[in-house]
Image: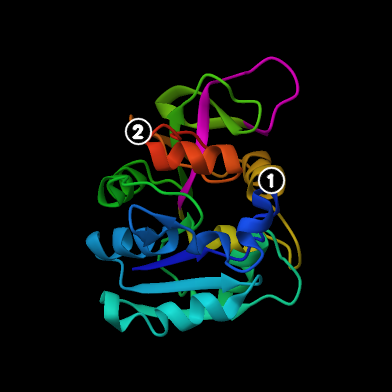
Amino acid sequence: MKAVILAAGKGERLGSLTQKLPKPMLPYQGKPILEHNINLCRQHGIREILINLHHLPEAIEGYFQDGSRWGVSIRYKREEKILGTSGAVKNFEKELGKDPFFVIYGDNYSDVDLSQVLKIHHEKKAAMSLVLFELQDVSISGIAELGGNDRIIRFIEKPNGPAISHWVNAGIYVMEKVLVEEIPSGFSDFGKDAIPLFIQKEYPLFGVRVAKPVVAFDTPELLKKSQSGSGKQTPR
């Protein structure tokens, strides 16, 4: 099985911390955040990993190389211009093959049971499964409104008004290849563009609720909290 790990972002909200180091390479529990995500994939039998790059790509390529040290095979694509989260997946269309695959945001930490997520995805015959966890303050998150059987009936990125839900996007998906064909070439974002499009076209999207939140590192404050063990939230 394959996974696309998204690692191109600049992490501008972290200021000087990411001027010389890509955000996914920031250390957490003694290892780069991205290394935790690669290890998570390997633990659940995912051996083929595709990583998009933009900001300081040499730091990631030089550290992980072909992935053999971690028991995986890694291929990279550099983006001259940022393509966005779903745009990056579209850019890997030819490499993905026909089988379902994972998408993982490489600048968050999580120990979600990917095998269980995949099992639920198959049981529900989903076109896309989104890992969700509960969060009180959803103002900087992507939130999913769930219907029967946890089917996603609406998705709003960073809502301005009252929250329609407190189930937020953890930045971990299982996708069927048919959805990649729906994503236009160029820049696009899962939360703002692709997921609402999939819902509008009535593809079966389902939420997979998990109890454990992800750890986010998007601001100096969240990074500091993560080092103290209290940064368990996500802006996705």
126 or 175, nearer to the observer? 175
Q: Residues within 10 Å of mark 1 (few under 14, many from 20)?
A: some
Q: How many marks?
A: 2
Residue 107 as seen in the image, left or right of residue 100: right
Q: Magenta residues?
A: 155-173
Q: Nearer the viewer, residue 148 or 94?
A: 94
Quarter of the figure with the C terminus: top right
Q: Residues within 10 Å of mark 2 (few under 14, many from 20)?
A: some
The disc at residue 28 is none
Quick check: is 162 in the magenta stretch?
yes
* Residue topped by disc 2: 210
* Whether residue 235 is visible: no
Which residue sits at x=45%, y=23%? Answer: 148
Place of residue 166 in the rendered image (x, y in percent of width and height, measured from the top left): 53, 21
Question: What colour scheme has been applied to the protein in the rendered image?
Answer: rainbow
| Residue 177 in view | yes
Residue flagged by tag 2: what amino acid is it?
Val
CB atoms of marks 1 and 2 within 8 Å: no
Figure quadrant of the N terminus: bottom left
* Secondary structure type for disc 1: helix
Q: Is residue 54 left or right of residue 207?
A: right
Q: Name the residue furthest top.
A: 162
Residue 150 in which image quadrant: top left
Depicted 176 relative to depicted 195: above or below: below
Query: Marks 1 and 2, how far apart in space?
Result: 24 Å
Q: Residue 165 in the image: state x and y as whole percent.
A: 56, 20
Q: Percent x, y for residue 187?
A: 75, 62
**Which amino acid type corresponds to the residue marked 1 in the rendered image?**
Leu
Determine if the magenta segment contains residue 161: yes
From what the image shows, is residue 127 above or below residue 66?
Answer: above
Q: Mark 1 sits on what residue?
A: 197
| Labels 1 and 2: the sequence-earlier one | 1
